């Protein structure tokens, strides 16, 4: 498969990689047809996905299986009116049906919009209204279904409701409008032949991620149909996946990290994706899964490595693992040291955003330097610019930037927001607003966000969403959300709160505010620290000085 897209696959050094790597983009590339169906035609029994959960369920899928199931799903979705350009929300956690649905939507030319299991009615309604979402496909979960039902009352565009039962119940007990996807996929009266025509072009939108900002509600990051090709670098040269071997990235389907590590680049490289649909992260269980299923290449957020190091690693046979990678937040050098001591493996850090594939990484030709994120991907050619727009000198801090000349896999804009798109991509460079510096050997070192994003346990959290949730509580006059250092999670969320008259600080009120945030928005966004103050530090113009608050956080 790779020779279809690369003139050269193997390289002798990073410099050789940087100088000679190039992705050849075919006309009208479609991941569903040109990767999934292409493998199914060439090697129909080639294993694509090994899926397991915490309840003893296990299913293996070949590319032939994924091809047929996605055809059937696509034919059904087409029959209920889903067409090219329609947005379809997927709240499927790590269910195997996500791979089938995503492939089906790509073939249809519809736009996949992944969402989190923890989204509330407000989150779902906002996303549905923002993209005129007509169809939602959910796991059979009481909370998710309840929130979707409530959201439908205000989000008038939602008309198709599809549920993934997945054997959790003997029958689908949802009444009324909910359609059981599993029954659809088993219905032989629905064709599983390829009847869908290729209707997409390279610059059509294939996928939208909602990403959090600091002063606005989440933006809709739009990726074109060439986006999967950008992840060749992510999978082949950073995660070092191996054909016909098992690759595991720990990520929920709601997040861009899923696209980084669980479908696109991995399947282009012919690797088998290991999908472990865990209820919650338990380090011992994860280690047992790696041992039991003989995972070959592995990627997880730094937080998970920290928690796994708290286990007795000598109890687990991890000899099947050839390569370890991480992304999501800066990696503590001590974690790298301890992991190497216990497993013999270096952790290779990578860096990027929902807006693109891996941009910086330790690619393996050069030694890993403690604290460094590595070197630029030749696909995106990231550089560091100072405040004057000039490339920085070695040791000088600046913003990581990518040429806005449409590198393969970089986003094509913010859906429905021409102003934000022009601001991001209208100049010579796309500025990530991530601060870094470069040493004399070309290694990049991440410093921090130039805005106020918080990275906690691998999640990217925007203060505005949490502040918006808190301010709905009658006790809160105003508040500021910042990140406080934490040895395990990297950062935890801190709320600095000014109380309304009639309310007094206390433990009971802290818990009440925390519970309120959990109800109003995704629970992982709740503040673990709540501090009450008389007033917030502000600029003359009235803007909250979050940097000053963060400085006092330690």
Image: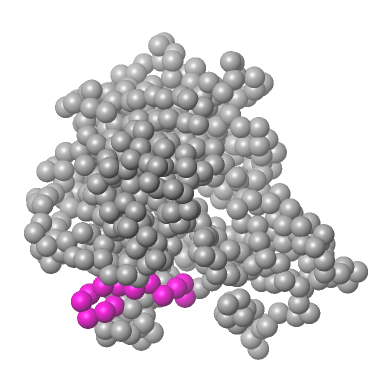
Identity of the residue furthest to the right in this view: 502
**For this view, does 201 lie left or right of residue 124?**
left
Give the x, y percent position of residue 342. Answer: 34, 53
Give the x, y percent position of residue 85. Answer: 42, 41
Give the x, y percent position of residue 254. Answer: 48, 45
Residue range in magenta is 438-450
- Tell me, yes or no, whether the highlighted magenta stretch contains residue 448: yes
Q: Quadrant for the C terminus, please.
A: bottom right
Q: Is residue 266 visible?
A: no
Give the x, y percent position of residue 244. Answer: 22, 34
The residue shown at (52%, 60%) is: 489
The residue shown at (70%, 38%) is: 150
From what the image shows, is residue 206 above or below residue 352?
above
Q: Nearer the viewer, residue 342 or 537?
A: 342
Q: Nearer the viewer, residue 457 or 187?
A: 457
Q: Nearer the viewer, residue 33 or 64?
A: 64
Residue 267 occupies quadrant: top left
The residue shown at (29%, 31%) is: 48
The residue shown at (68%, 83%) is: 537
- Tell me, yes or no, whether the highlighted magenta stretch contains residue 88: no
């Amino acid at each position: 498969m790779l020779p279809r897209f690369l003139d050269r696959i193997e390289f002798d050094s990073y410099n050789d990689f940087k100088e000679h790597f190039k992705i050849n983009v075919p006309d009208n590339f479609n991941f569903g047809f040109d990767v999934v169906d292409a493998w199914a035609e060439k090697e129909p029994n080639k294993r694509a996905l090994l899926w397991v959960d915490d309840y003893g369920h296990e299913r293996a899928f070949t590319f032939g299986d994924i091809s047929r199931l996605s055809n059937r799903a696509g034919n059904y979705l087409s029959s209920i009116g889903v067409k090219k350009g329609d947005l379809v929300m997927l709240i499927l956690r790590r269910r195997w049906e996500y791979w089938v649905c995503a492939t089906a939507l790509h073939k249809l030319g519809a736009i996949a919009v992944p969402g989190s299991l923890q989204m509330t009615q407000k989150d779902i309604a906002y996303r549905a209204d923002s993209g005129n979402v007509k169809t939602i496909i959910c796991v059979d979960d009481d909370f998710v279904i309840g929130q979707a039902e409530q959201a439908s009352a205000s989000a008038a565009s939602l008309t198709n409701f599809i549920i993934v039962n997945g054997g959790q119940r003997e029958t689908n007990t949802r009444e009324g409008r909910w359609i059981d996807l599993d029954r659809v996929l088993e219905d032989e009266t629905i064709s599983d032949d390829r009847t869908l025509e290729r209707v997409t072009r390279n610059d059509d939108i294939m996928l939208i991620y909602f990403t959090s900002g600091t002063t606005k509600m989440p933006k809709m990051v739009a990726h074109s149909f060439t986006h999967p090709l950008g992840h060749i670098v992510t999978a082949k040269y950073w995660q070092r996946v191996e054909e016909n071997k098992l690759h595991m990235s720990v990520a929920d389907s709601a997040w861009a990290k899923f696209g980084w590590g669980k479908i696109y680049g991995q399947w282009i490289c012919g690797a088998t994706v290991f999908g472990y649909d865990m209820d919650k992260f338990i380090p011992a269980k994860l280690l047992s899964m790696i041992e039991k299923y003989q995972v070959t290449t592995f990627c997880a957020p730094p937080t998970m490595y920290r928690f796994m190091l708290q286990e007795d690693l000598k109890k687990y046979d991890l000899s099947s693992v050839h390569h370890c990678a991480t992304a999501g937040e800066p990696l503590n050098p001590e974690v790298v040291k301890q992991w190497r001591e216990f497993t013999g493996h270096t952790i290779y850090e990578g860096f990027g955003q929902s807006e693109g594939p891996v941009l910086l990484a330790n690619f393996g030709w050069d030694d890993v330097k403690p604290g460094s994120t590595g070197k630029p991907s030749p696909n995106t050619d990231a550089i560091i610019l100072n405040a004057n727009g000039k490339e920085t000198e070695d040791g000088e801090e600046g913003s990581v930037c990518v040429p806005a000349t449409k590198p393969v896999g970089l986003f094509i804009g913010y859906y429905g927001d021409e102003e934000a798109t022009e601001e991001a991509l209208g100049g010579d460079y796309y500025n990530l607003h991530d601060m870094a510096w470069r040493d004399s050997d070309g290694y990049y070192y991440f410093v921090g966000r130039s805005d106020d994003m918080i990275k906690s346990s691998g999640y990217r959290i925007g203060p505005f969403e949490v502040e918006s949730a808190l301010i709905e509580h009658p006790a809160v006059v105003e508040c500021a959300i910042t990140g406080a250092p934490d040895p395990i999670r990297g950062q935890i969320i801190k709320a600095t709160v000014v109380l309304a008259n009639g309310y007094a600080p206390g433990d009971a009120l802290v818990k009440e505010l925390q519970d309120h945030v959990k109800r109003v928005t995704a629970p992982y966004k709740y503040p673990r620290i709540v501090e009450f103050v008389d007033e917030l530090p502000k600029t003359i113009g009235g803007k909250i000085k979050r940097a000053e608050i963060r400085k006092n956080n330690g």
